[in-house]
Amino acid sequence: MPLDRFQEMQIFTRIVDRRSFTQAAEDLNLPRATVTNSIKRLEARLGVRLLERTTRQVKPTLDGEAYYQRCTRLLADLEETEEAFRDPDPQGRLRVNMQGTLTQYFVMPRLPDFLARYPRIDLFIGSGDHFVDLVREGVDCVLRAGELADSSMIARRVALLEQVTCASPAYLERHGDPATIEALDGAAAGVADHENNGASVSGSGHRAVNYVSSATGRALPLEFTTPEGVARVTLPGPVAVNGAELYTAGALAGLGIVQVPRYRVREHLASGELCVVLPAHPPPPLPVSVLYPQNRQLSLRVRAFADWLVQVFADVA
């Protein structure tokens, strides 16, 4: 049976999203030959070349990009129209990507509840805190912690997590327990409004386990709330990491001061393996958000998952 025009649009947009005929065929559960022949018929009917094919990648031509934008809007409208009349029970495949610690502590323990509530959703979870090209990688949404800088995504905040500054007793015995922010480096720390990205200061007193941002490749400063705004302090350190578990492990090993969500170190604080530093000036709370592409209709699956995440964090954060 020949494919209808909407099916051809779905195939074409998935190829552009994935930059691959093979991956598009796998996503749509279609034979590779069906996908290839569909594009040949589509290009012949329109009388234009939509895709540039090389041995390494597939990308849209200028005409293909224009056609892709229109197809995306039409398919989103179609999806929205059908969902208005379809069985309200979400169904189908949902691909999400989440940071490992958030998944481990919050999502996985409650996941049986989600699957029992939505048994017709087929869930695939990828883990990491690196940048994910949702459209290119075929991911429906991501769960991320931290301030968001990517304006191409629509974000829904699901939680604000309390954070703490902490260090091991062995570290504090060697370097002392700072009574003030200024005592961290023996000089006046820079205090600036959080919204204005105030200046950081460096010093030679205390040490930090520096966390390197996957987005910028630079170490993040320590942040402390004060009546005047947020003080940002950059400290030297013997080690830098780019993983949450490594970050906490560095603090436990006495390598320096860290700032982490309280949930990650609650047991270590209770056991005395870590101690809270500068409790009068805690770090700002850490936002947690669900992100999805702004040029995509929010499907029932994504909406159901986001609503569920809000409840999960409300219950246990």
Image (cartoon, rainbow, N blue to C red):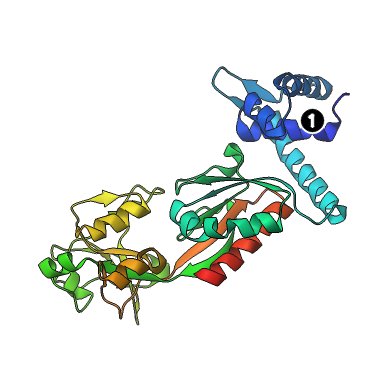
Residue 209 screen position, x and y as percent: 25, 57
Residue 149 screen position, x and y as percent: 48, 55
Could you tell whether 200 is left or right of 62 in the image?
left
Does the image show residue 189?
A: yes
Residue at (67, 33) in percent of width and height: 27
47 up-or-down from 242: above or below: above
Q: Quadrant where the N terminus lies?
A: top right
The residue wearing badge 1 is: 8
Residue at (71, 25) in percent of width and height: 50
155 up-or-down from 21: above or below: below
Q: Please rate how many residues cluster around mark 1, counting C-alpha atoms within 10 Å: few if below 14, some from 14 to 19, many from 20.
A: some
Front in this rendered view, residue 202 or 82: 82
Residue at (51, 69) in percent of width and height: 316
**Which amino acid type is shown beneath numbered disc 1?**
Glu
189 up-or-down from 211: above or below: below
Q: Quadrant of residue 304?
A: bottom right
Residue 308 screen position, x and y as percent: 63, 62
Residue 196 screen position, x and y as percent: 40, 67
Callout 1: SS: helix
Could you tell whether 159 is left or right of 305 in the image?
left
